[in-house]
Image (cartoon, rainbow, N blue to C red):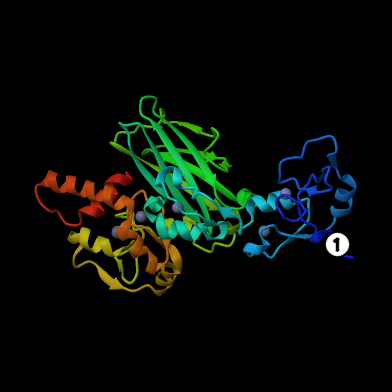
Amino acid sequence: MAGPSVLKCSRCNHPLSYFPIYQNGNNELICGRCPQPRGANCVRVTCYEVLAFKQEFPCRFAPEGCKENIGPEIAPQHERNCPFRKINKCPTALFTQCSWEGKAVDFTLHCFDDHKEHFARNNSLELSLFESGEYYKIVPCGKEIFIVRIRFDALQNVLFSTAVFCGHEANSGKFTCEVIVEDEAKTLELTLPLVRNFDSVHDTKLELHSLELTAPHIVVKIEIADKSQEKKKSLPSEQVLAYLRCPICKCLMRTPMLFYLGGPTLCRDCNQCLQYFNGRMINVQNFGLHNLIKLGANRCKFYGCDFVANEGDIVDHENNCLFKERIDAWALRIRTLFGRAVGPERVIANRLLDF
Ligand SMILES: [Zn+2]
Ligand SMILES: [Zn+2]
Ligand SMILES: [Zn+2]
Ligand SMILES: [Zn+2]
Ligand SMILES: [Zn+2]
Ligand SMILES: [Zn+2]
């Protein structure tokens, strides 16, 4: 005798794994995915439910490729999140007008293929202090996609933020999403609850009054962290990174060259910026430091940016770094001030911003 796993709903033809199960006047069994049948002869078949409760059923998306067997207890949650369920409307459609539809499992790749221009560059968003506005950013973290909406009210000087998690709802607890705004002296951080969509109002408010914001733009950092990955990271700690900073220009020392000047270790940039030390510099390679830096201690050289990567990736990052433009703007100001090029203005700008 075949078990209940071969039983199908007479309406939707999916497995009878989704409770409550009703029987109508025509002796048809109808699952909980379908509208509840009404009428005098309709009864809930609790005896079936009791028997089927411990059974395993194929997922309703088995024809689409899902290989999981699931019991009635988790069927509703699984089906809402099954990687093989169909997404009828791209979750970014609200701001991309995208008409993509497909399997949930393909959504992350779709974002990388078609929505890269909406990714938050360096996990940051730059917005004008003088204008209210609504901004959407896609933030990937591992295989998951997050969509963050930030509304800025310029009159009240307040940010309203919402973070939508597009992955399996059971995984949302593994992630944290923070919105960070800072001035020279102070950092405001706000943890956003992860929600399923923008439909209801989930805005979390962040008042910026206590910050001294003078620039025409503010940078809002969006930090998404995978708590389960944090322990696995083997990048050097903040303290180690601090020792690897050049005492003069504050940037992180880079391979391949390090320069010694009596005591402090200076970076390559300083060789240019501190020309008056000329002659007193000795060119020494420090293999211990070199290896440490190669490991992944390379921090982006632009002030304000927290990006850390290995030697290969950091150059790529710096070419596109959002903070580069800011530093370059400062460098231009310095050049204008002096009426000429005064050497590595970027180094000087980095320093100015650091104090
Ligand atoms: Zn049904
Ligand atoms: Zn499934
Ligand atoms: Zn799309
Ligand atoms: Zn330096
Ligand atoms: Zn430097
Ligand atoms: Zn950077």
Question: In the image shown, does 228 or 13 lie closer to the viewer?
Answer: 13
Q: Secondary structure at mark 1?
A: loop
From the top left corner, tell me how far across and down residue 191 is, in percent.
Answer: 54, 40
**Going by the image, does 342 lie left or right of 12?**
left
From the top left corner, tell me how far across and down residue 205 is, in percent.
Answer: 49, 31
| Residue type, mark 1 in image | Gly
Q: Is residue 243 visible?
A: no
Instruction: Name which residue lies at 36% across and 25% down.
Output: 155
- Residue 186 in which image quadrant: top left
Instruction: Name which residue lies at 55% across and 52% down.
Output: 87
**Going by the image, does 138 lie left or right of 80?**
left
**Going by the image, does 80 lie left or right of 18?**
left
Q: Residue furthest left?
A: 339
From the top left corner, tell me how far across and down residue 42 is, in percent.
Answer: 83, 39
Quadrant assignment for the C terminus: top left
Instruction: Name which residue lies at 57% across and 42% down.
Output: 195
| Residue highlighted by disc 1 | 3
